[in-house]
Image (cartoon, rainbow, N blue to C red):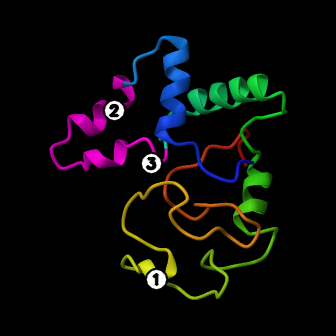
Amino acid sequence: MGKYRVTWGEFNRWLDLQGRDKTDYYLDVLNNPYAKKDKLGDDYPAIVSWQDAKDYCQWLGINSGKKTDLPTEAQWEYAARSGGQFLIYGNSDNTLYYDGDPKRNFTDGFSPVGNFAPNPIGLYDMMGNGKDWVNDWY
């Protein structure tokens, strides 16, 4: 599992290498007058289909020489729980924070990848700031 989420910048480079147009991924945002266009910046988390996420992981593995794939649901759960801890609210002090409390790494929308502190095992954005795909169904 990567330390950071895949960003639009990384995903767009992959699309460019395939000769694909990134506009299809941006249409929902571009056509929505209320959407925040800055959330499509290169340092924001890429929000893509399961198949594109899977294909990106496989391409990354081939080009890095490492075994790379989407995590299984169990792997994701283990990482999200910081190594299997039981944290009711997904944070280390088991307190519910809400309403965009930036002092506690919570906001009401997407932020640049890695903008907040990592979880106890060093992974960023595990409790929000995007959507996650897994390789299997629980």
Assign a secondary structure to mark 1: helix
Assign a secondary structure to mark 3: loop
Assign a secondary structure to mark 2: helix
Above or below: residue 17 compared with residue 53: above
Q: Which residue is mark 3?
A: 44
Tell me which numbered mark, 3 or 2, is placed earlier along the sequence. Answer: 2
The answer to whether 32 appears left or right of 15 in the picture is: left
Q: Amino acid at mark 3?
A: Tyr
Tell me which numbered mark, 2 or 1, is placed earlier along the sequence. Answer: 2
Tell me which numbered mark, 3 or 1, is placed earlier along the sequence. Answer: 3
Q: Nearer the viewer, residue 59 or 79?
A: 59
Relative image position of residue 29 (x, y in whole percent): 28, 39
Above or below: residue 111 compared with residue 88: above
Disc 2 from disc 1: Cα separation: 31 Å
Q: Which residue is mark 1?
A: 103
Residue that protrudes farthest toward the left in the picture: 33
Seen at 78% across and 34% down, the residue is 68
The quarter holding residue 77 reads bottom right
Q: What range of the chain is rendered magenta?
A: 23-45
Q: Amino acid at mark 2?
A: Tyr
Seen at 36% across and 42% down, the residue is 40
Which dot, 3 or 2, sits closer to the camera? 3
| Label 3 crowd (10 A; few <14 / some 14-19 / many >=20) | many
Relative image position of residue 25 (x, y in whole percent): 39, 30
Q: Which residue is mark 2?
A: 26
Disc 3 from disc 2: Cα separation: 13 Å
Relative image position of residue 64 (x, y in whole percent): 78, 29
Q: Amino acid at mark 1?
A: Lys
Is residue 33 magenta-colored? Answer: yes
